[in-house]
Amino acid sequence: MLRYDLAELLRTPGMRQIYDLHEPPFADDDVEYVAPITGRVTVTNTGTMVLVRGPIDTVIALECSRCLGPVRAPIHADLEEEFDVAIVEDAAQRVAPIVEEEIGRVFEGATLRLDVLIRQAALLAAPLQPLCREACPGIAMKETGDPEDGIPLNSPFRVLGKLLKE
Ligand SMILES: [Zn+2]
């Protein structure tokens, strides 16, 4: 999904392809899309560069930065990427690609991995401190006294202590 074979475009300077995106929600490595990914992406071979341009919209799942509850964050991003045609062609002609170098690559041979670009764009566009609601009070704490397990709430050993009990 979200992978496009650009072999013909790469062979054809001046060629342009338009992709209308309607990708159902899915979970990627570190991003969970909870609404369809929509958008219109234009890929152009200028002769020296491959340009990938266009708006994408989706909704991703995040954790509230105060209470760790679920947050649905709407994402809008404008893709604006360019790749050297020679580099893409090299990748297309490589017989035995080195696996380590493939991580995070946008092109696999002549295949454009739009999922990689969209994931990067979604992470960049995501709010740094998402809140489930403006007035989220954070994790509920008792006003006075220590919690039931006897470990002070502000103790750095609190998490460790909990783990040890389990
Ligand atoms: Zn919250």
Image (spheres, helix red, strand yellow):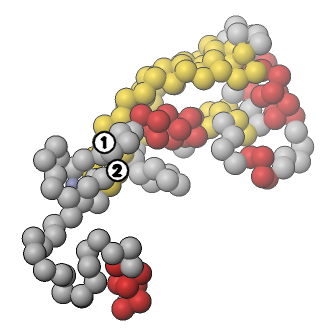
x and y percentages locating residue 136 in the rendered image: 16, 52
First-in-chain label (1 vs 2): 2
x and y percentages locating residue 98 in the rendered image: 84, 49
Q: Which is nearer the eye, 155 or 109? A: 155
Q: Residue at x 13, y 80 (%)?
A: 145
Specify the quadrant of the image occupied by residue 125.
Answer: top left
* Three-letter code, disc 1: Ala
Q: Using the numbered discs, state the Cα–Cα distance from disc 1 to disc 2 in whole angstroms.
A: 6 Å
Q: Which is nearer the eye, 57 or 142? A: 142
The numbered dot on residue 61 is 2
x and y percentages locating residue 55 in the rendered image: 43, 23
Q: Residue at x 30, y 42 (%)?
A: 73
Pointers 1 and 2 in contact (C-beta within 8 Å)? yes
Q: Quadrant of the C terminus?
A: bottom left
Q: Is residue 137 left or right of residue 10?
A: left
* Tag 2 secondary structure: strand
Q: Against 162, is 15 above or below? A: above
Q: Residue furthest bottom?
A: 165
Residue under label 1, please give it. 73
Image quarter where ligand 1 lies: bottom left
The answer to whether residue 115 is visible is yes
Q: Is residue 120 left or right of residue 56?
A: right
* Three-letter code, disc 2: Ala
